Amino acid sequence: MYILTFDFMQRALVAGVITAVLASSIGVFVVLRRMSLVGDSLSHAALSGVAAGMLFGFYPFYGALAFSALAALFIEYIRKAFERYAEVALAVVMSGGMGLAVVLISLGKSFNADLFSYLFGSLVAVSPSDAWIICGVGLFILLSLVILFRELFAIAFDEESARLSGIPVDAVNTYFTLLTALAVALSVRVVGTLLVSALMVIPAAVSLQTAKSFRATFGIAVGVAVFSVISGLYISFILNLAPGGTIVLIATAILMTVISTKKLQ
Amino acid sequence: MKFEISNCAAESAEGEMHKKSQDTDEVVSLTGVTFGYNGTPVLKDVNLTVKAKDFIALIGPNGAAKSTLMKLMVGLLLPRTGEVRLFGSDVRRFGQWHRIGYVSQNAVRVNTGFPATVEEVVASGFYSGFGKLFDTAGRRKAVQQALEMTGIQNLSRRLVGELSGGQLQKVFLAKALVKKPEALFLDEPTTGIDAASSKEFYTLLKELNMREGITVVVITHDIGAAFDRAAKIGCVRNGKVYIHDNIDEVTQEHVAEVLGYRIPELSAAFSTSQNPKKS
């Protein structure tokens, strides 16, 4: 455990575990609502926020938070115009976010090396202030999820019935998308914008294959995500690999093992 | 043909659920309601009243706007013109959602892969607002009662995805019943399930109507079950709704006219329905 003697590694682990819990918890609802691509859409918007920060001289992490939150509101806005085709909103925001990011990156050619850490995650990238932001905002997101758990479950299961139970479905949906945006932006430092979506979807996919109740679905998803992040960070430190990619590959291996085992049974 | 429903099933036994306030015996009323999609009206100047303890089966051909009518009744859709009142309140301002239970048409199709147990799904119907987040004791009791009423307490730990269509429909009914509603609205609840399960389901609805005094409005293509169990028939066709107070006045020829086709196997149902003392 000598890797814990490094300050940056301690921060990376704390930030990683928090983002794993957040991304996987939100991921369960995202997958059940058939919006698995929402993480990709928001992370592309977060990337444009990072690029804007680098170009205009404000802290890129704040740019990621602000741009992904705005993108979340934009998704809900477009979704209302295409009620039966929710994926249209995701595709529009994903390509729009990527387009804006490419334009901003091309305007500021000098920040390509720093941008790399935001694209694929970095062990040394989590600064002390990043760690505090991740802890604070992460706690807020988790608290919101606990308070809204029943509402989110009811909406994910049957939106019309939820509406007739008196649940303010539109308000809860918008708030949830905003929480997703914040979770995506927080995850960017550890796993990177291009891979954050995997941390949401893959643990949820594993739990859907194995869980015997909704409570267990959450437990398994969080467990898989936390295990993938801790082992991924450790292996990436030892082998000098990009942490985001390593984490996602471990989670994918777990999913493939579970699917194969189920098929053999 | 009549446009207004009067109260029936007044002989219902007093049940545990029959304890709600009697501020009005009108559950739903539609007055001059017109509704359309993309400018084309599918319901035109509809007037109808559903009274407490009614058991109404709504029938009609595909695309007759039966589901639209039910969504208007419960406030999921709002009329372009006219007025919808739920328990005496304008549906736009209605807030007593615990008084109605709703089972949507797509419930079974959408949710078969959902990773939740029967108990978790039924409990999700018990929503008492943000302030009652930790009302676990009351919730557990209500869930247990709903499971018992629908006879699925032995399935409580099973995943909903493992159930048959008939069992699943009882789960959705239990979910709608968990908040002890005064009225149930069901949109084609027996679609895709076998005849025996369908018959059992309608018998259960009839029991809830008679024993607990719950008003039931159900859209169905299962005409035989509808005539066997419902007290009134509502025909939805060409944008209009015709309610028959007396089921015996509805002939097989009339049903064929409403649906646009004849159902040979209805003879048995009609012979039963013409019996004034059917159960």
Image (cartoon, grey):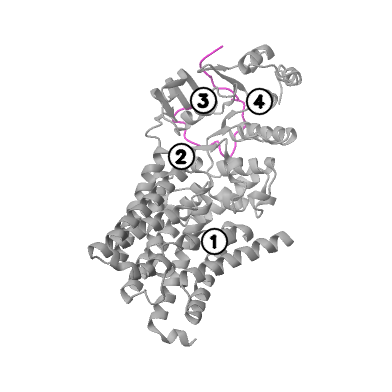
Judging by the rendered image, the residue that carries numbered circle 4 is B226
Q: Is residue A139 visible?
A: no
Number of the front mark, 4 or 1:
1
Q: Which numbered disc flags the more N-terminal residue, 4 or 2?
A: 2
Parent chain of label 1: A
Are tags 4 and 2 found on a single chain? yes
Number of the front mark, 4 or 2:
4
Mark 3 to mark 4: distance in Å? 18 Å
- Segment tinted magenta in the rendering: B1-27
At which x and y percent is residue B237?
Answer: 55, 17
Mark 2 to mark 1: distance in Å? 37 Å
Q: Which mark is residue B51?
A: 3
Q: From what the image shows, is residue A182 above or below residue B70? A: below
Badge 2: residue crowd in 10 Å (few <14, some 14–19, many ≥20): some
Q: Is residue B243 visible?
A: yes
At which x and y percent is residue A34?
Answer: 52, 49
| Residue pictured at 41% horizontal, 42% vertical | A79
Judging by the rendered image, the residue that carries numbered circle 1 is A202
At which x and y percent is residue B74?
Answer: 47, 32
Number of the front mark, 3 or 4:
4
Judging by the rendered image, the residue that carries numbered circle 2 is B97
The kind of residue tagged 1 is Ile
Q: Is residue B141 magenta?
A: no
Badge 1: residue crowd in 10 Å (few <14, some 14–19, many ≥20): many
The kind of residue tagged 2 is Trp
Could you say which is closer to the camera, residue B179 or residue A88? A88
**Rendered-image quadrant of the C terminus of chain A:** bottom right
Badge 4: residue crowd in 10 Å (few <14, some 14–19, many ≥20): many
The kind of residue tagged 3 is Lys
